[in-house]
Every structure is written in structure tokens, then in C-alpha cells.
Amino acid sequence: MMTTMNAHPITFALVDSSAGYEATPGKVRLGSLAEFSRDVEIFVRGSGKDIDPGELDVSIVQGSLGIQTAPIPIGSTLLADLQRLASGSLLDQVDRRRSDVIEKWQKLARSAKRIAVRITSEALEKPLMVNAETDYHSNKADQWVHVERYIRGEIQDLGGSTKPNAHVKLPDGSTLTVATDREMLRDERQNRLYKLAMLRITAKYNVVTGELADARLIEFVEYAPDATEDLSALRARGASAWSGIGQAAEWVDKQRGGDAD
């Protein structure tokens, strides 16, 4: 059983009067409750595995509409990220999924004006607010450039009824989703599924992290990886062919009728 000495609960409170009344545990729009619950789940989980929201008990508490977690261990990435958020407005050192949620809440607050999120815990010196006045941002936000490039990978999925795209497994093991046009897929004569392919794309490229985003297919490029043999095998074959020749330069000169001396 965890004690408050090494763990603290966290309360996420939605301050929302956009429906014409203050959201409380007694009355709240179903859509607002469902979306806020999903956001809290994503924020709690983050990208790590130290906390599983599926195994975490929560309770609905007063404080507008509040979701309070069971005690979270000191040293968890969740509490560490909350402390980073409390100490400044930069999101660079915060887990990517959590920073995405913070940016979503901030954007929502700025557009609705009557929505805010308050996060409290004994692990924090004061409540953490996300509202229309906060300015959480990343220094990397403006380091995206538009590029056109060629990528190589295995096509693992191709199609889609509403948003056609290709899922490409890259050589580093990551998967890039590349948007495409339905007409391009319809006119494609070659079956590319589960095969290596070369694609010409446009995308946004992060000059700091090397990440590609918003990729869109320009065309499939003819690519025949089987036509390129392993260089080591070619070297071994060449060494075997020249094994009885001796000095290659002398042999070539003699074949030309010259004098090697």
C-alpha cells in the first residue's frame, strides 16, 4: 500500500462554462466529459510504461469537474513532467504526448475563452493552470521546413476509403504515413503491398529532430533492389577470377601488346 510519503494523487479539473453553466460532477455535457477523460488518460499514460491508466483508480471530485487519480509514485515521469510545466512555459523537455495535450487544452481555452484546466497535487508548490493567458510552447515549433525527397521502405498498408494513404516501414524501423490521392491508387498497376518501394514525397521536416510529418505522395519511383548484388560477393568473385594472373597491370599491358618493363 502506497503512502503519501512516496506518492501523491493528482487532480485534473475542467473549468468549463461554455454551455451556459459551470460544469460540475452533477451536471456536464456528455461530449465534454468523454473528451476530457480521454485527454487525461493520454496525459497520464504519456509515452512511457511506468503508469497504466487502465489499472489506475480515479474519482470524480468537486472543483468544477475534477478527475482525481490514485496516488502517483514520486519519481514517475508524470510528476516529473508536471514539475517541469510548473517551472516554466517551454515544452521541449516534456513527454511529447503530454505536451500535445497541453497545447490542445491551451488552444481550446483560447478559442472558447470560458474553458481552462487546473492541475493540482501535493507534489506541486501551486496549482498548474492551462488557460487563454498561458503560453506553453516549444522552441522546436518553428524549426519545420517543407522538403521534397525520396524515401525507401516496405509498403505495409495501402488504401483507405476517406483518407487514402500508404503506411511505409522505413529502414530504421519507424513507420511513416504518406497521404495520397484516390486516383493515384486507382491507376496504380503494380501490387506494391508488402514490397520494398521508392517514393517521392513532399513533407515537413524538423531540422532539429529529423522527423518527417504531413507527408504526401508525389509518385512511386521504379525501384529494383534485387538488381544490386552484395558488393562483398562481387569482390570475392573478382578475386577468384584474377587469382592466377599475378600482377594485374602487367597482364593488361601484355594483352595490349606493350612492354611492362
Image: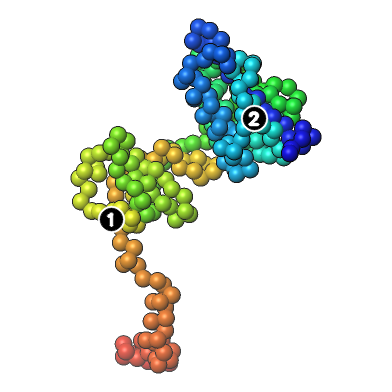
Q: Residue at x 49, y 24 (%)?
A: 34
Confirm whether residue 192 shows in the render.
yes
In which image quadrant can residue 61 be found? top right
Residue that carries the numbered disc 2 in the rendered image: 69
Secondary structure, mark 1, is loop
Identify the amino acid type marked 2: Thr
Q: Is residue 222 left or right of residue 64?
A: left
As rendered, which of 159 and 138 lies closer to the eye?
A: 159
Quadrant in which the N terminus appears: top right
Disc sitting over residue 137 in the figure: none
As rendered, which of 101 and 208 lies closer to the eye?
A: 101
Q: Residues within 10 Å of mark 1 (few under 14, many from 20)?
A: few
Position of residue 172 measured from the top left corner of the image (x, y, whole percent): 48, 54
Badge nearest the viewer, 1 or 2: 2
Residue that carries the numbered disc 1 in the rendered image: 222
Q: Residue at x 68, y 39 (%)?
A: 76
Q: Is residue 150 left or right of residue 47?
A: left
Which residue of the protein is positioned furthest toward the right in this rendering? 5
Quadrant in which the C terminus appears: bottom left
Identify the amino acid type marked 1: Glu
In which image quadrant can residue 240 be found? bottom left
232 relative to 102, above or below: below
